[in-house]
Amino acid sequence: MALGLGYGLPFSVKRPVQGFSEDVALSVNNALADAAQREEAGNCLAARAIDIMQTVQTQPSLLIVPQLYKAGVLYDQLPTTRTNFIPNNSMAGATGSVLPTTWASGSIPAGFTFSVGASGQATANDGTVVNYVDVSVSGTATASGTFNLFFSAATGAVTATTGQTFTLSAYATCISGDITTPAMVLQVQEVSGSTFQAGTSTNIALASGAALQRVSAVRTFNQSGVTAARGRIGHPIVSGTTYNYTIRIGSPQLERLSVPTPMIATSTGAVTRLNESTDVVGLPPEFSVSRNTTATRVNSSGLIESVASGVPRIDWLGQSCPALLVEPSGSNGIRNNSMVGANVSTNALPTNWLTTLNGLSHQIIAIGTESGIDYIDIKLSGTANNTVATIAPESSTQIVAASGQTWTNSVYIKIISQPSPPSSYSLAFREGTSGGSFVNSGSSAITPTTTLQRLSATRTLTGATTERVQPQINFALVSGSTYDFTVRIGWPQMEQSSVATSPIPTTSGAVSRAADVISASGALVSGLIGQTEGTIYVEVDVRNFEANARIIGISDGTASNRITLLLASGSRFRLVATVSASGQVSIDSSAQVSGVYKVAAAYKENDYAFYLNGSQIGTDTSALVPACTSVFLGKVETSASTNLLNDRIRAAALYTTRLSNDQLAELTRL
């Protein structure tokens, strides 16, 4: 992907004129160069990031609009960090015949010699001041081979994996002689251990007296077993050929990007630059994603699909621009909701499914997939001898429960043929003891529809000796009436939860989904959190309201020191701050309905403010500020599996300053 970043400009000029869209573009290149995926959303996600950047004059220290990801990582849009992995591009140690420290030469054929001459600084044709070293070559080769200068020894090569993209750049010119035939090449190499695997080269025509110019080579790694990336400059040597030239090489740079970016000076190791101005230690502070099971999401085509373990879920359910789905752990107790055992030819229901049809008969019409959902079509026909026909996707002995627990039953369902349909259908629970009596309780009746929709019913179990729950789909009948209709049933689910969570496919047994645990921590993250003052912002899509669910927070990894935005009982938003386990702030909004909200909390000692959708909710003028080192998205700081959001985060940002109240109102305005 090309960037219109004006990299030809001097560094001091380039940064002030760089636009918001260029920051987003650089973050995209950072992620894609790291073998990440980009959620293609018609630029709505990039536009969402840019909108946050330009709404107030203060730039976020950290901004995440979920779009860029791979297994275990969710990438942010800010800070935009770049790293030069060449450990010594400042030519330290170059003297006489000695190469700069950490550089290395390859095996050179007899008769061909090179020496290291002058080193210093010079201005390149793009205005960049670069450090250079002069290398002189002379002699008549008595054997063929290759002249190589490596910008790091094999042991100093940067760790790399298949799928990553690296760009090598350097400034070069020929100051005497001529090396146009054969052409000098700049090459990005894939290395396994110290063994060269493959490379991508750019020819450099270095005519004597040419300006010091920047050249580059780009490679996306594709070799199996690759462990490192390495850069070199050199050319083939032909036996019997006389060589006599001096080239000047300046400020080589190896970066995990698909384009060369402004030069970063190094001397003793790799250097990462944060937001183009500050050198920092370490790599970009991306969010780690821990979920050790597969899970489902709705993709941009409206299909439910499985995503791999640890992959963030960018979810499109009910929206034209997606958001990050964060859920707690869950388990579907219904076996065979993928229709295992169903058979059209033998009229067999899925294994463990049961029916009580009361005068009707069933026929399996079809088994298939709609919108990624496994389904079975069941035709029910005949004269009813009771007021209900029931299909139970699970036996009454399978799902273990206990009194006081809250369970949710859900199913995808529609009528696909209805010459004589039922008046309504509903989901029901049967709760009781294994082998003993059961009590029925159902949800409100739903008028049959021809559109596949998900129905759900929630119940807190009350039986004193409850040990089992059984899900049921009930069809309302009139005894003595004749019926003929076909119903499509897809992915029934029974889970211990107060809401229906994302579908969990099952086959021969119950299946669990791990929690989406998403956080960032470390020294670099600490610097992105305002330690004495700051602002936390989030745009959240609240559909499945659950009290105490965390939306976003900063902390030291414990509940003792934290600032958290969460959902409180009574359908409210709450701002909480704690210092040394002592509560400092607790501000609640008034009752809210489900939907999209923009929420911000600004903090400074004795100066907290809480804003929601453009309006001030409350302030606190007598509160301290905790020292924090971590950022959490949709989770509680002290547990991997409890009080998770169970909803969708559209964007989040941190500021290292306490935004003004006017800025908070503008930032959160819908």
Image (cartoon, helix red, strand yellow):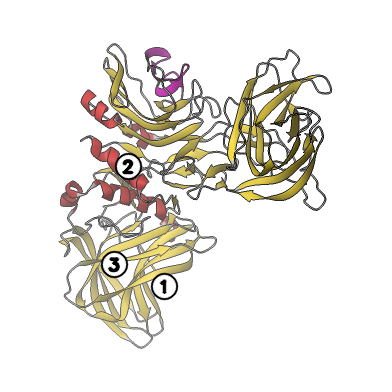
Q: Is residue 230 left or right of residue 398?
A: left
Residue at image location 22% in from the left, 62% down from the top: 132
Q: Splitting the image into 4 quarters, where does residue 437 fall?
A: top right
Residue at image location 27% in from the left, 80% down from the top: 180
Give the residue number, with chain letter if any, for mark 3: 97
Q: Residues within 10 Å of mark 1 (few under 14, many from 20)?
A: few
Q: Amino acid at mark 3?
A: Ser
Q: Nearer the viewer, mark 2 or mark 1?
A: 2
Q: Amino acid at mark 1?
A: Ser
Rendered view: 614 above or below 504? above
Residue at image location 48% in from the left, 17% down from the top: 569
Q: Amino acid at mark 2?
A: Ala
User: Disc 2 vs disc 3: Cβ atoms closer than 8 Å?
Assistant: no
Q: Which mark is residue 49?
A: 2
Is residue 244 a member of the stretch shown in magenta? no
Q: Which mark is residue 107?
A: 1
Residue at image location 27% in from the left, 31% down from the top: 667
Q: Can you give x and y, in whole percent of width and height, for residue 281 in the image?
A: 34, 42
Rendered view: 148 above or below 259? below
